[in-house]
Image (cartoon, grey):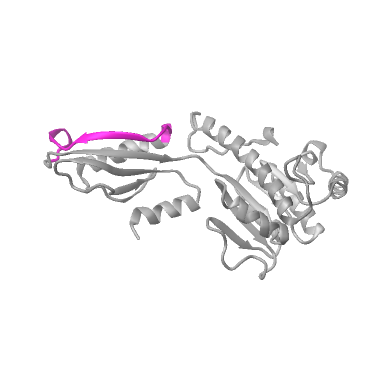
Amino acid sequence: MKTWLVAQWEYEQHNQPYVLVSVVALQGSSPRGVGSKILVTKSEQFDTIGGGHLEYKAIAQAREMLVTGGPTQMIDYPLGASLGQCCGGRVSLMFEVFSTTKMPVVVFGAGHVGQALVPLLAQLPVQLTWVDSRYDMLPKVLPLGVEGVHEEHPQDHVADCLAGSCYLIMTHHHGVDLALTQAVLNRGDASYLGVIGSATKGRKFRQRLAAKNYVQSAIDHLNCPMGKDGISGKHPMEVAIAIAAQVMDLYQKFNVSSNKNLTAQDPKNPIKEILEYV
């Protein structure tokens, strides 16, 4: 497999920004052919478009675009004295920026609804993690792009989640659901906290949280039942579709927030708190 393609997979899996530079047109002689690519990150590059000053200029341009963002660009480079290359041709490079941060989504529970939901979420532009305490519940072959985590005490995994995560709690045990809810509220940086269940379950959870001295402003972040209003039904797929629709609303707002932050003074940290959207 080509070096740039392996790197692209790794950076996509870890939700890291990069620029893909491709040779898309040639005139005359050039060091590499059409289709040659180099993947550029803040500190590394993978593969080559021929080396020399052309590649140096392309890497510098790509890293500038990582900071400023912006749409795909096409830039022509004459391979003459100005680039210190004697090929005498002309190369057109395409710069594609992949810098929009994906909203992290964590699904706790691999029961009937989890099994219906995760394949749906895997088709959305989110970073998806699936957690369960039971060895035999997570599928041996996960949907592409999904990270599976076996954790005997699922609430312990909350500490490892990214800031701004969307938490979807649907385990097989109400006590575990409550422990996860507390762990998420204790972090205080969720973009969304949803727990599967009825309105009665939601009311009982809020009462228990109040009894544990959680302030009302924190308790108000709990969504139980969860899912988009107006989508009803109790079958696993019906519930999964309602939750997936809610996630769609959230990641669209998340992307708006992230894109605004790319122009802020600190482009290194595009993930900001978006609790205002909950």
Residue 186 visible in the snapshot: no
The spot of residue 94 in percent (x, y) is 32, 39
Is 157 displayed left or right of 72 in the figure?
right
Magenta stretch: give its range: 67-85
Residue appearing at x 77%, y 39% in the figure:
218
Please name whichever residue, 152 or 116, is drawn nearer the observer in this view of the structure: 116
- The image shows residue 127 at horizontal and vertical percentages of 56, 49
Which quadrant, please, contains the C terminus? Answer: top right
Residue at 39%, 45% (x, y): give it: 41
Q: Is residue 70 left or right of residue 225?
A: left
- How many badges with numbers are in the image? 0
Q: Is residue 137 left or right of residue 8?
A: right
Residue 226 in the image, given as x and y percentages of width and height: 75, 46
Does the magenta segment cover residue 167? no
Placement of the N terminus among the 4 image quadrants: bottom left
Of 187 and 166, which appears nearest the observer?
Answer: 166
Query: Vertical placement of 231 versus 130: above or below?
Result: above
Query: Residue 246 at what x, y percent from top left?
Result: 68, 42
Residue 136 visible at all:
yes
Would you say 107 lies left or right of 233 here? Answer: left
Q: Residue at x 78, y 46 (%)?
A: 232
Residue at image point 66% right, 63% down: 151
